[in-house]
Amino acid sequence: MTPPRSTPGWAVRLGVWLGVLLGVTALPARAACGDTLPQPGRAVIAANGLQLAHAPTVWPLPVGEPFGLDIELCGTAAALLQVEADMPAHRHGLNYRVQLRQTAPGRYRADGLLLHMPGRWRLLFDLGPAQSPQRLVRSVDVD
Protein backbone atom coordinates (compact mmCIF):
# COMPACT_ATOMS: atom_id res chain seq x y z
CA MET A 1 0.00 0.00 0.00
CA THR A 2 1.30 3.44 -0.88
CA PRO A 3 1.09 6.39 1.51
CA PRO A 4 -1.48 9.11 0.56
CA ARG A 5 -0.06 11.87 -1.57
CA SER A 6 -0.38 15.34 -0.16
CA THR A 7 -1.83 17.95 -2.48
CA PRO A 8 0.91 20.37 -3.46
CA GLY A 9 0.37 23.87 -2.11
CA TRP A 10 -2.38 22.98 0.37
CA ALA A 11 -0.53 24.81 3.15
CA VAL A 12 -0.20 27.91 0.97
CA ARG A 13 -3.92 27.86 0.11
CA LEU A 14 -4.82 27.37 3.77
CA GLY A 15 -2.59 30.30 4.69
CA VAL A 16 -4.22 32.50 2.07
CA TRP A 17 -7.72 31.62 3.29
CA LEU A 18 -6.78 32.22 6.91
CA GLY A 19 -5.23 35.54 5.96
CA VAL A 20 -8.39 36.58 4.11
CA LEU A 21 -10.62 35.56 7.01
CA LEU A 22 -8.49 37.27 9.61
CA GLY A 23 -8.08 40.33 7.43
CA VAL A 24 -11.82 40.70 6.97
CA THR A 25 -12.58 40.34 10.64
CA ALA A 26 -9.77 42.72 11.59
CA LEU A 27 -11.16 45.57 9.49
CA PRO A 28 -12.22 48.49 11.65
CA ALA A 29 -15.98 48.88 12.02
CA ARG A 30 -17.38 51.84 10.14
CA ALA A 31 -18.71 54.48 12.51
CA ALA A 32 -22.45 55.01 12.49
CA CYS A 33 -23.78 58.38 11.40
CA GLY A 34 -23.04 60.95 14.08
CA ASP A 35 -20.97 58.70 16.37
CA THR A 36 -18.31 61.39 16.65
CA LEU A 37 -20.82 64.04 17.81
CA PRO A 38 -21.32 64.69 21.54
CA GLN A 39 -23.79 62.24 23.13
CA PRO A 40 -26.26 64.36 25.13
CA GLY A 41 -29.18 65.20 22.86
CA ARG A 42 -27.64 63.58 19.78
CA ALA A 43 -30.15 62.31 17.24
CA VAL A 44 -30.15 60.89 13.72
CA ILE A 45 -32.86 61.70 11.19
CA ALA A 46 -33.26 59.63 8.02
CA ALA A 47 -35.75 60.05 5.18
CA ASN A 48 -35.78 59.77 1.40
CA GLY A 49 -32.26 58.36 1.26
CA LEU A 50 -30.84 61.23 3.34
CA GLN A 51 -29.30 60.83 6.77
CA LEU A 52 -28.38 63.64 9.15
CA ALA A 53 -27.02 63.49 12.70
CA HIS A 54 -27.03 66.48 15.00
CA ALA A 55 -26.12 67.28 18.58
CA PRO A 56 -26.91 70.48 20.46
CA THR A 57 -24.17 72.37 22.27
CA VAL A 58 -26.43 72.49 25.35
CA TRP A 59 -28.70 69.69 26.63
CA PRO A 60 -31.47 69.79 27.61
CA LEU A 61 -32.37 72.54 25.16
CA PRO A 62 -32.76 75.82 27.01
CA VAL A 63 -35.66 78.28 26.83
CA GLY A 64 -34.62 81.83 26.03
CA GLU A 65 -30.89 81.12 25.67
CA PRO A 66 -28.98 80.76 22.40
CA PHE A 67 -27.42 77.41 21.52
CA GLY A 68 -25.79 75.74 18.54
CA LEU A 69 -26.00 72.45 16.70
CA ASP A 70 -23.13 70.31 15.43
CA ILE A 71 -24.40 68.56 12.29
CA GLU A 72 -23.11 65.69 10.16
CA LEU A 73 -24.55 64.59 6.80
CA CYS A 74 -23.96 60.90 6.15
CA GLY A 75 -23.85 58.97 2.89
CA THR A 76 -25.00 61.82 0.70
CA ALA A 77 -23.50 64.44 -1.56
CA ALA A 78 -26.28 66.89 -0.66
CA ALA A 79 -25.36 70.13 1.06
CA LEU A 80 -27.01 71.58 4.14
CA LEU A 81 -28.70 74.75 2.93
CA GLN A 82 -30.52 76.04 5.98
CA VAL A 83 -31.38 75.29 9.61
CA GLU A 84 -34.52 76.69 11.22
CA ALA A 85 -36.96 75.91 14.01
CA ASP A 86 -40.68 76.45 14.34
CA MET A 87 -43.49 75.94 16.80
CA PRO A 88 -46.45 74.54 14.83
CA ALA A 89 -48.97 74.92 17.67
CA HIS A 90 -48.33 78.67 17.74
CA ARG A 91 -47.66 79.06 14.00
CA HIS A 92 -44.35 80.87 14.41
CA GLY A 93 -40.65 80.22 14.22
CA LEU A 94 -37.43 81.74 15.41
CA ASN A 95 -37.04 85.46 16.00
CA TYR A 96 -33.39 85.36 14.91
CA ARG A 97 -31.59 84.11 11.83
CA VAL A 98 -29.42 81.02 12.34
CA GLN A 99 -25.78 81.31 11.29
CA LEU A 100 -24.67 78.22 9.35
CA ARG A 101 -21.12 77.36 8.36
CA GLN A 102 -19.40 74.28 7.00
CA THR A 103 -16.62 73.03 9.29
CA ALA A 104 -15.44 70.04 7.20
CA PRO A 105 -16.78 67.99 4.29
CA GLY A 106 -20.26 66.87 5.38
CA ARG A 107 -19.94 68.68 8.75
CA TYR A 108 -21.67 71.91 9.76
CA ARG A 109 -22.21 74.19 12.73
CA ALA A 110 -25.45 76.12 13.21
CA ASP A 111 -25.28 78.92 15.81
CA GLY A 112 -27.84 81.36 17.13
CA LEU A 113 -30.84 79.09 17.66
CA LEU A 114 -33.01 80.54 20.43
CA LEU A 115 -36.25 78.86 21.44
CA HIS A 116 -38.00 81.75 23.16
CA MET A 117 -40.85 79.82 24.84
CA PRO A 118 -41.49 76.32 26.25
CA GLY A 119 -43.43 73.74 24.26
CA ARG A 120 -43.03 71.51 21.22
CA TRP A 121 -40.56 72.82 18.64
CA ARG A 122 -39.44 71.34 15.34
CA LEU A 123 -35.82 71.56 14.20
CA LEU A 124 -35.88 71.94 10.41
CA PHE A 125 -32.95 70.98 8.19
CA ASP A 126 -33.11 71.88 4.49
CA LEU A 127 -30.75 69.83 2.32
CA GLY A 128 -30.29 69.71 -1.34
CA PRO A 129 -29.23 71.14 -4.29
CA ALA A 130 -30.96 74.52 -4.07
CA GLN A 131 -33.20 73.66 -7.06
CA SER A 132 -34.90 70.78 -5.22
CA PRO A 133 -34.32 71.00 -1.46
CA GLN A 134 -35.60 68.35 0.91
CA ARG A 135 -36.48 68.91 4.54
CA LEU A 136 -35.63 66.69 7.49
CA VAL A 137 -37.48 67.38 10.75
CA ARG A 138 -36.98 66.53 14.43
CA SER A 139 -39.59 67.39 17.06
CA VAL A 140 -38.34 68.34 20.52
CA ASP A 141 -40.15 69.31 23.70
CA VAL A 142 -38.62 72.23 25.57
CA ASP A 143 -39.49 72.96 29.22
Image (tube, rainbow, N blue to C red):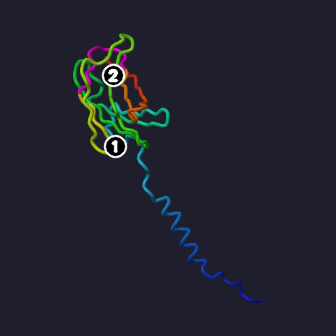
- Give, as a three-letter code, the residue at label 2: Ala
Of all residues, the one furthest to the front in this rendering is 131
Of all residues, the one furthest to the bottom in this rendering is 1
- Residue 105, percent across and down? 33, 45
Q: What residue is drawn where x is 60% and y is 80%?
A: 9
**Which of the 4 image quarters holds residue 81?**
top left
- On-image quarter of the C terminus: top left
Q: Secondary structure at mark 2?
A: strand
Decide which of tag 2 and tag 1 comes sooner along the chain: 1
* Residue 50 placement, left or right of 110: right
- Residue 72, percent across and down? 35, 39
- Residue 129, percent across and down? 40, 36
Q: Secondary structure at mark 1?
A: loop
* Residue 95 placement, left or right of 4: left
Residue with the mark numbered 1: 36
Residue with the mark numbered 2: 85
**Residue 124 is covered by the magenta coloring:** no
Task: For marks 2 and 1, give the one nearer the viewer.
Answer: 2
> In the image, which residues are magenta?
112-121
